Amino acid sequence: MSGLRVVVIDDERPALDELAWLLGRDDRIGEVLTCDSATEALRMLQEIDADALFLDVQMPGLTGLELAQVLARFKEPPPIVFVTAHEQHAVEAFELRAVDYVLKPVRAERLAEAVRRIVDGNSRQTEVADEQIAVERGGVTRFINRSDIRYVEAQGDYARLHTPGDSHLVRIPLNQLEEQWAAAGFVRIHRSLLVALAHIDEVRMEAGRYTVRVGGTDLQVSRRHARVLRELLNRGRP
């Protein structure tokens, strides 16, 4: 069967069924198996190979975090996405090398992002090689290294690549660059901004709003993207 085989674990049947249904709609998912307890999931994983787990945190008996600790001892533990209503366990979850931490109620687009992270993680086992980007100015085409790009700014159907002391306009939508460069450490911080995690010098919060400083430039982080940015920085920059 093509696509990912995933296991969903949640002791609450409505949440279990909804999450399984949402995952089943994703073209990247080939098979969805469900369990209503971590103990049952552990028995299942001794018999089958799973490409990823979508795991609740607080469950009777063996909790989701405890299951993740057990799976960490496996020779090849499956990637884990925690799906929970409790935000306070995020740090512990990422210490267990969780791929993502999704809060309930689950939105389809947020779940799709978690699946993308699983796919990206499965498709690369080594450090992502640098890439050269062709840019044109005054009829002359030259090449810049992606590793030199500090942040990217959306300008309609174009994107402006900001490097130290210069910027370059390319005809590539920001959404496309976000997808292509995620594995290289670029993350969306605003609907119009993509930033290279490796180039972030400071993260500030004032009056409940986050900004990041990149090469002397302060960039606004939207509320929608602030939590994901914090999670990625807590896990360590590339």
Image: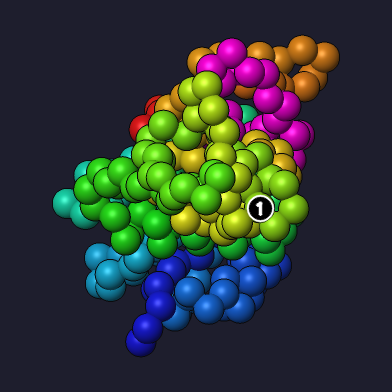
Q: Residue lying farthest bottom?
A: 1
Whether 119 is among the magenta residues is no
- Which amino acid type corresponds to the residue marked 1 in the rendered image? Tyr
Q: Position of residue 120 (x, y in %)?
A: 40, 57
Residue at 43% x, 69% y: name it: 6
- Let me know if residue 135 appears in the view: yes
Q: Residue lying farthest right?
A: 207
Residue at 37% x, 83% y: name it: 2
In depth, the one of 18 and 162 nearer the eye is: 162
Residue at 41% x, 31% y: name it: 148
Q: Position of residue 114 (x, y in %)?
A: 53, 55
- Let me know if residue 100 appears in the view: no
Whether residue 45 sits left or right of residue 210 in the image: it is: left
Part of the protein shown in magenta: 213-235
Residue at 54% x, 28% y: name it: 166
Whether 226 is among the magenta residues is yes
Q: Is residue 36 above or below residue 134?
A: below
In depth, the one of 43 and 2 nearer the eye is: 2
Q: Is residue 65 above or below residue 77?
A: above
Number of numbered discs overlaid on the protein picture: 1
Label 1 sits on residue: 158
SS under mark 1 = strand
